[in-house]
Image: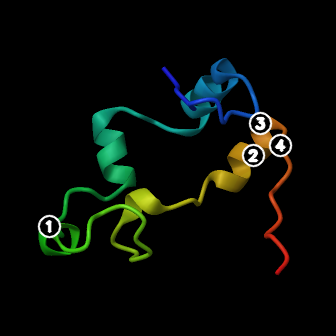
Amino acid sequence: MVECYGTERISKAKIAELISEHFDLRPGAFRKYLDLHRPIYQKTAAYGHFGREDRDFTWERIDRAKALRAAAGLEERQPAQA
């Protein structure tokens, strides 16, 4: 199931299809891809564990974003000009 709270630019069905194609969501594969079997308790306990740029927070990676945008037929977003 996919929930985008109205922010989706393509259908939720297509998003779910892309997730299935690009991510192996089996627990063991997920743990291996995100390298979750390592003790980083102190880092995650301090200052929260979302929105961090520290490379140990593997769940923050966006390394597949470009491939997903291309597969979805969406053009890459350009940074806003200041």
Along the viewing direction, whichever of 80 and 20 lies nearer the viewer = 80
Q: What whole-number distance in Å separates the C-alpha atoms at marks 3 and 4?
A: 5 Å
Residue at 57 percent across and 59 percent down: it is 62
Mark 2 = which residue?
69
Element class at badge 1: loop
Labelled pair 3, 2 in contact (Cβ < 8 Å)? yes
Q: Is residue 42 left or right of residue 19?
A: left
The tag earlier along the polypeptide, 4 or 1, is 1
Q: What whole-number distance in Å separates the C-alpha atoms at marks 2 and 1?
A: 33 Å
Looking at numbered disc 2 in the image, what kind of residue is underneath it? Arg
77 over 81 or under it: above or below: above
Residue at 40 percent across and 71 percent down: it is 52
Q: What whole-number distance in Å separates the C-alpha atoms at marks 2 and 4?
A: 5 Å
Labelled pair 2, 4 in contact (Cβ < 8 Å)? yes
Q: What whole-number distance in Å separates the C-alpha atoms at marks 3 and 2?
A: 5 Å
Looking at numbered disc 4 in the image, what kind of residue is underneath it? Leu
Q: In which quarter of the image is residue 74?
A: top right
Labelled pair 3, 4 in contact (Cβ < 8 Å)? yes
Mark 1 = which residue?
39
Residue at 71 percent across and 49 percent down: it is 67
Q: Is residue 37 left or right of residue 7?
A: left
Label 4: few (<14), some or many (≥20) within 10 Å?
few
Mark 4 = which residue?
74
Q: What whole-number distance in Å separates the C-alpha atoms at marks 1 and 3?
A: 36 Å
Mark 3 = which residue?
72
6 over 42 or under it: above or below: above
Element class at badge 3: helix
Looking at numbered disc 1 in the image, what kind of residue is underneath it? Pro
